[in-house]
Image (cartoon, coloured by chain):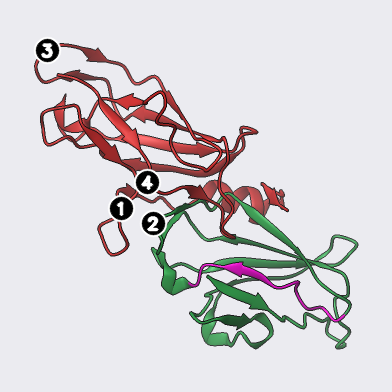
Amino acid sequence: MTLITGGRFSDFAGNPIANGTLKVRLGQDVNAIDGTIVGAGWLASVPLDSNGNVTPFQLWSSAEINPSVPYRFKVFTPAGQEVFNQEIFVLDGPTFDLGGASYATISY
Amino acid sequence: MIVTQIISSKPFTDCVGGVNSNGYLTFALSTSCSVTDGSAMIGYAEVTLQLDSNGQVITTPPQFLWANDILLPPNSYYIVTGYSANGQLVWGPNYITVTSGGVGGGVFDLCVPWGSSLAFTYIIDEVYDFLVDELGVDYYILG
């Protein structure tokens, strides 16, 4: 699994989405590299810190799941307003910085 | 002919590695069937297989299904759906064909080694897309 870090989620003015929430789920059910069967119906909820960064957590990278599909990431303000909604492929590696996710990794 | 024991050598999990503890799977045949030797007729009512605390199909007592390769008409399959212990849809519905070498009995593992052909035909989860992405429903929140 890959450690998901960073994010630096902010608004148009550059203010961090302080103490917001990231919600993530798989795009579809998959098999993981260790043989487990992973359901897309589970929605993980991860808190953001005062700088808009996620509390580090683990996900299977897209190279470790079959079919290789992206995750759906959404970010909400503390008031519950949705401010980010993208599909992102988690690239294989020990860590994956959400704030460094290039457009090449994002599926619109 | 006899039924086939269903196991999962690995657990059913969420995307962050947590197991579907004490959840369950429902299996529904794609159509009514008969056993090839004429020993039984099988409707398409759902059968429930329980998962244990590790997210694996319970083996004590063993849980059984008719293998599709001893059923008529040919090319039947099971529609499988996974639920959490609280009854929330968390996986599927997906399709699987249970095989027994054409003789019934034996053990069928729902999990396959990495690199093998998938046992399940995974269906795009439009249910989740609709509930989570269109309606904004928090479908099942982990920790």
Q: Which chain is red?
A: B
Name the residue tied to disc 2.
A35
Please name which of the two marks, 3 or 1, marks the residue nearer to the observer. 1
The subunit carrying tag 3 is B
Numbered tag placed on residue B112 in the rendering = 1
Q: Which amino acid, mark 2?
A: Gly
| Residue B32 in the image, given as x and y percentages of width and height | 27, 20
| Residue B19 in the image, given as x and y percentages of width and height | 56, 48
Name the residue tied to disc 4.
B9
Q: Which amino acid, mark 1?
A: Val
Please name which of the two marks, 4 or 3, marks the residue nearer to the observer. 4
Distance, label 1 to label 4, CA atoms, is 8 Å
Q: Are the residues at dot 1 and dot 4 in contact (C-beta closer than 8 Å)?
A: no
What residue is drawn where x is 89% and y is 84%? A15
Q: Which amino acid, mark 3?
A: Gly
Distance, label 2 to label 1, CA atoms, is 6 Å
Distance, label 2 to label 4, CA atoms, is 8 Å
